[in-house]
Image: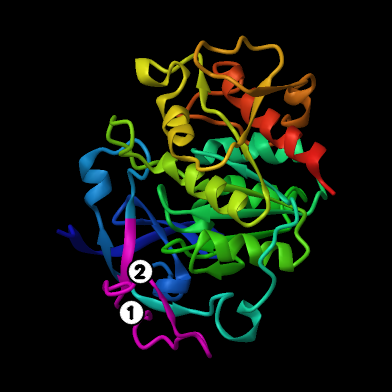
């Protein structure tokens, strides 16, 4: 059930494209103005408070559900017929790349490298490995947060020239492009002249502790689609030295689950100065010297831990980006 309460906007903290950070009756909250319309101090609003009340580490803030002052009667996007979040109270039509003639492009990625990440925190080091101005698209898949604008990392990568565009797939929304499926998203990227794609879920991850009950399996979906369409799938392994949970220490069970489900061989990047764990074969050792310098001006954080606390995690994702860069045509 939704847990909603009525309140008043008491402060606007930040405004970004597609995202507003604010407080409602003194509690931190986020709003997506493309869904709710503009928001201002004093507005009468409904907020979803469930995440905060559950004490979630990621997403532990309120989310503006409706603006009763100025958010009613908003017009839809002209020419759009495909719904995001269909058959929910938040359904809204967005123009998708597959609609009309624009959706009838080629069906071959021609070897385009596709970096497949199981966590959003791998995105920054993977893009750093690819380098600035490489013509990279970020493709956000379901399995974590759905709104692309929620990510400060994506905003920084876009501003710093590491990303050429962003794509929101399935129920994800707020990208510069929207696609119904990961296959269509990758083809749309290739059609637009993108040279490489990095696929990841949004911030946070759906997780249950089971081998297959987590959002990280989006990396397998990305790898399978890339391989089937003639691209080159590169897996960014999840590696940890600082995680207290045994299932994520060393090589995470998330990565092993992804490898269980890929249909074609995937190229697994591995930092050359880190020992390869038993049971993981066919990795490609990548020289990651200088990864810290490449990431120095970028936001690095994994479960609240820094690069000094989790060097192998960030080095492994950087290695995937560096391998993808070597594959650029």
Rendered location of residue 74, percent (x, y): 41, 85
Q: Is residue 19 visible?
A: yes
Q: In the displayed structure, would residue 323 be above or below residue 291?
A: below
Start and end of the magenta stretch?
A: 63-90
Q: CA distance from mark 2 to mark 1?
A: 24 Å
**Secondary structure that dominates the magenta span:** loop
Q: Nearer the viewer, residue 65 or 243?
A: 243
Q: Nearer the viewer, residue 95 or 222?
A: 222
Q: Nearer the viewer, residue 105 or 207?
A: 105
Q: Is residue 145 magenta?
A: no
Q: Is residue 131 visible?
A: no
Rendered location of residue 327, percent (x, y): 79, 41
Decide which of tag 2 and tag 1 comes sooner along the chain. Answer: 1
Residue picked out by circle 2: 85
Rendered location of residue 196, percent (x, y): 72, 51
- Count neighbours of disc 2 (C-alpha within 10 A) and say few if under 14, some if 14 to 19, many if 20 or more: some
SS at circle 2: loop
Q: Quadrant of the N terminus?
A: bottom left
Drawn side of residue 226 relative to residue 146, left or right: right
Drawn side of residue 326 relative to residue 35, left or right: right
Residue picked out by circle 1: 69
Drawn side of residue 327 relative to residue 38, left or right: right
SS at circle 1: loop
- Count neighbours of disc 1 (C-alpha within 10 A) and say few if under 14, some if 14 to 19, many if 20 or more: some
């Amino acid at each position: 059930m939704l847990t909603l309460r009525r309140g008043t906007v008491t402060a606007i903290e930040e405004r970004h494209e597609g995202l507003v950070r604010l407080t409602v009756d003194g509690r931190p909250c986020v709003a997506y103005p493309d869904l709710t319309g503009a928001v201002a101090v004093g507005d009468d609003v409904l907020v979803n408070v469930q995440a905060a009340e559950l004490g979630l580490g990621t997403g532990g803030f309120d989310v503006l559900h409706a603006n009763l002052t100025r958010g009613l009667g908003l017009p839809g996007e002209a020419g759009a017929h495909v719904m995001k979040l269909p058959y929910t109270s938040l359904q809204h039509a967005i123009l998708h790349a597959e609609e009309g003639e624009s959706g009838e492009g080629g069906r071959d990625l021609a070897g385009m490298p596709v970096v497949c990440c199981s966590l959003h925190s791998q995105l920054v080091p993977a893009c750093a490995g690819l380098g600035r101005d490489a013509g990279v698209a970020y493709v956000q898949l379901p399995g974590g947060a759905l709104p692309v604008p929620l990510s400060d990392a994506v905003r920084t990568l876009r501003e710093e020239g590491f990303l050429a565009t962003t794509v929101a797939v399935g129920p994800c929304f707020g990208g510069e492009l929207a696609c119904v499926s990961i296959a269509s998203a990758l083809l749309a990227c290739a059609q637009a002249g993108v040279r490489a794609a990095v696929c990841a879920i949004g911030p946070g991850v759906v997780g249950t502790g089971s081998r297959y009950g987590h959002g990280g399996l989006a990396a397998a979906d990305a790898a399978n689609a890339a391989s089937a369409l003639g691209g080159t799938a590169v897996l960014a392994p999840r590696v940890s030295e600082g995680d207290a949970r045994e299932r994520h220490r060393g090589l995470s069970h998330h990565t092993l689950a992804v490898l269980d489900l890929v249909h074609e061989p995937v190229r697994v990047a591995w930092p050359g100065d880190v020992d390869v764990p038993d049971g993981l074969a066919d990795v490609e050792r990548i020289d990651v010297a200088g990864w810290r310098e490449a990431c120095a001006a970028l936001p690095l954080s994994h479960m609240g831990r820094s690069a000094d606390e989790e060097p192998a995690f960030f080095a492994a994702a950087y290695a995937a980006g560096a391998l993808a860069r070597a594959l650029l045509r």
